[in-house]
Image: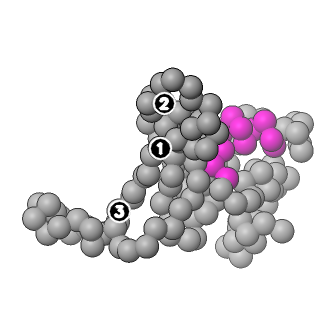
Amino acid sequence: MSDLLQRLRDRGWRLTAQRRVVAEVLDGEHVHYTADEVHARATARLPEIARATVYNTLSELVTIGEVIEVSTADRAKRYDPNARHRHQHLVCSRCGTIRDVHPVGDPLAALPEGERFGFSISDATVTYRGLCPDCSTDCSTDCSTD
């Protein structure tokens, strides 16, 4: 059973067949699927699931805080079920692969007082960018990030 499924059961969220399939698709380590990818995988398990149902379910999961919506520059939003463990993201600038990372230190403490402009800061999101091993290997003469 996925951690997401158990969290949804614990909160008493009604698990229809469609919602269950979406939660099962999101199970796993380093899962960051787009809504269309979730729909394609859900359709393989439950052919009659509608695209709108997948989108609505993802939206509900984000609203209740069980899934994180991850936006990366010029790419479709992705959905991360790792909502219970503080982490940051490592994103390939070429192919868009995303991995969860757990850097040491407090990113809030990294911003000097003089750079806070009077803000009372409650959260910080750090995104690391670079080339994944596949894209690093595939680049021939021009290895610049797009």
The magenta segment is 31-42
Seen in the picture, residue 128 relative to 146 is either above or below; the reply is below
Which amino acid does the dot numbered 3 rest on?
Ala
- How far across and how far down the image is residue 2, in percent? 78, 66
Determine the image quadrant of residue 53. top right
Q: Residues within 10 Å of mark 2 (few under 14, many from 20)?
A: few
Return the disc, 3 or 2, that comes first in the chain's sequence. 3
* Residue under numbered circle 3: 124
Which amino acid does the dot numbered 1 rest on?
Gly
Determine the image quadrant of residue 28. bottom right
Q: Nearer the viewer, residue 143 or 9?
A: 143
Q: Nearer the viewer, residue 60 or 92?
A: 92
- The answer to if 35 sits in the magenta stretch is yes
- Quadrant (top left, top right, bottom left, bottom right) of the N terminus: bottom right
> Any mark on residue 143, and which?
2
Q: Is any part of residue 109 visible from this angle?
A: yes
* Residue under numbered circle 1: 130
Return the disc, 3 or 1, that comes first in the chain's sequence. 3
Seen in the picture, residue 73 relative to 98 is either above or below; the reply is above
